[in-house]
Image (cartoon, helix red, strand yellow):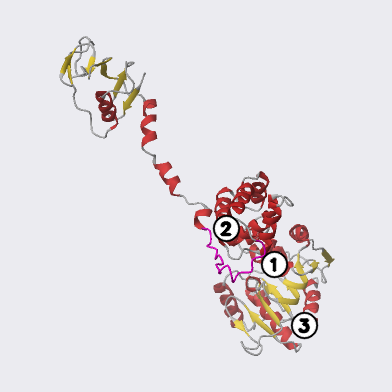
Amino acid sequence: MALQVVKCRSSWTLIMASSTDQGPSFIQTRLFQRSHSSIAPRKSSLSNCNEKSGSQQSKPVLVGSRKSGPELVRNGKKYAPVILKQTRYLPTETKFASGIVPSTATARKAKLRSFIDIVPPAPITIPNLPRDEADVIVDLNKDDISRILENFARKPLVRELSEQNNVNRKMFHAAYKSFRNYCLHASPLDPCIAVVISDILNKARDVDSLYPYFIDHAKRVYPHLECEKELKTLSDLTKPYNWYPKARELFRRIHFHAGPTNSGKTYEALQQFYQAKTGFYCCPLRLLANEVCEKTNEKGIKCDMITGEERRYAVDADNPSSHVAMTVEMVPVDVNVEVAVIDEIQMLRDQSRGWAWTRALLGIAAKEIHLCGEEAAVDIVRSLLDPIGEHVEVHLYERKTPLTVNKEALKKLDNVKDGDCLVCFSVSMLFSVAKSLTKLGVQPTNHIRTISIW
């Protein structure tokens, strides 16, 4: 035979010619083991590897108790010469060694645990009543039960149906082992299973008839199979509307009040909010929530206010009101109401806060939802609600008063007039402008015919 073994640490090659006997000799075996050891090979009298020049003819060596020339003799049997020679190191020759010692990547991969390892099969309690106390409908032989279950497990159709029910091969073996153990040792055996096995023995049914009882047993062994479909549905990030089962139980009516500022769209939506028995008002600003809360209470309708900063109750925390005005991040999706108003719906396209409007649109459990915003947001709202099957009824509004652009800048606060609105983009700027207006004798507020600050 021809055998070549390479030790990567020091490039030694063992070359063995054909032998006249079966199996390697004692010297060949030792040389083979030494070439794979972690210790550097010792100098041998069989090699001339350290010589820079010379003939490659083998010298006489002592084998056993006899001296040998070109041939090796042991126990009266002759072997071809064994020659050790030093070769150049080749990267391809390390394949044999890499197969012996696993690489780091292979070791890491072996440490990874599959889902089946994390969720082990659950133990099943087997009834064990005395035979005289058990109600045995059909007297079955354990050998017959074992033979039928063996034929059942080998059916390709059974494996295929199990795969469709998310029972892979490893789970199938564990579930079958538990099912077989139950059928053989249960006292009494489930009457339905006993009747089916009896019919199979009488050739009245096929072994496939056991599958419904097997899959029920498999779901007891692996309880997650019962809700695996729901888990996959809820974890699908491409279908966020499935995250709100409370809202999906309702057939909601969606009204989109589209129009520019000062067109009356929010006013019309709030009329439905006032008339409802229960309702939510969602908006982007605490100031808007406060305004709607005050107006609702002035109409004699108890309304609470909830924002990220405070909670204000019309009565107290133990007696919540039927109407709530809140910032959109605070809206609950597990409470049923009659009417919900979502203001500034076009904000769902915002990169930082858009998630809150998307959550409110898909998740509010209200019979009737009124959306207020720009007409440009109609298409994106429809694209979000079309997969649910909810129709969007659009109401268009026009501005009540004309809007004209002033040709001159305000320049200074002395030029403000009654009815002007000053927009500030920070809290510090807001208080600074309010303080400056107070010094000028102007009282800023948010009522009509006075100066408003936002």
22 relative to 57, above or below: below
Q: Position of residue 315 (x, y in %)?
A: 65, 90
Mark closer to the chain start, 3 or 2: 2
**Three-letter code for the amino acid on which mark 2 is drawn:** Leu
**Three-letter code for the amino acid on which mark 3 is drawn:** Lys
Q: Is residue 263 visible?
A: yes
Comparing 288 with 354, the one in front is 354
**Was residue 128 drawn as part of the magenta stretch in this picture?**
yes
Of the two numbered discs 2 and 1 in the rendering, the one whose residue sits closer to the viewer: 2
Which residues fall within the magenta stretch?
119-138
How would you classify the magenta stretch by its main secondary structure? loop
Identify the residue position indicated by label 2 in the image.
184
For numbered disc 2, what is the local secondary structure?
helix
**x 18%, y 21%: residue:** 64
Identify the residue position indicated by label 1 in the image.
245
Mark closer to the chain start, 2 or 1: 2
Identify the residue position indicated by label 3 in the image.
277
Count residues near mark 3 (Cα–Cα under 10 Å), then give few for <14, some for 14-19, many for 20+. few
The image quadrant that residue 104 belongs to is top left
Mark closer to the chain start, 1 or 3: 1
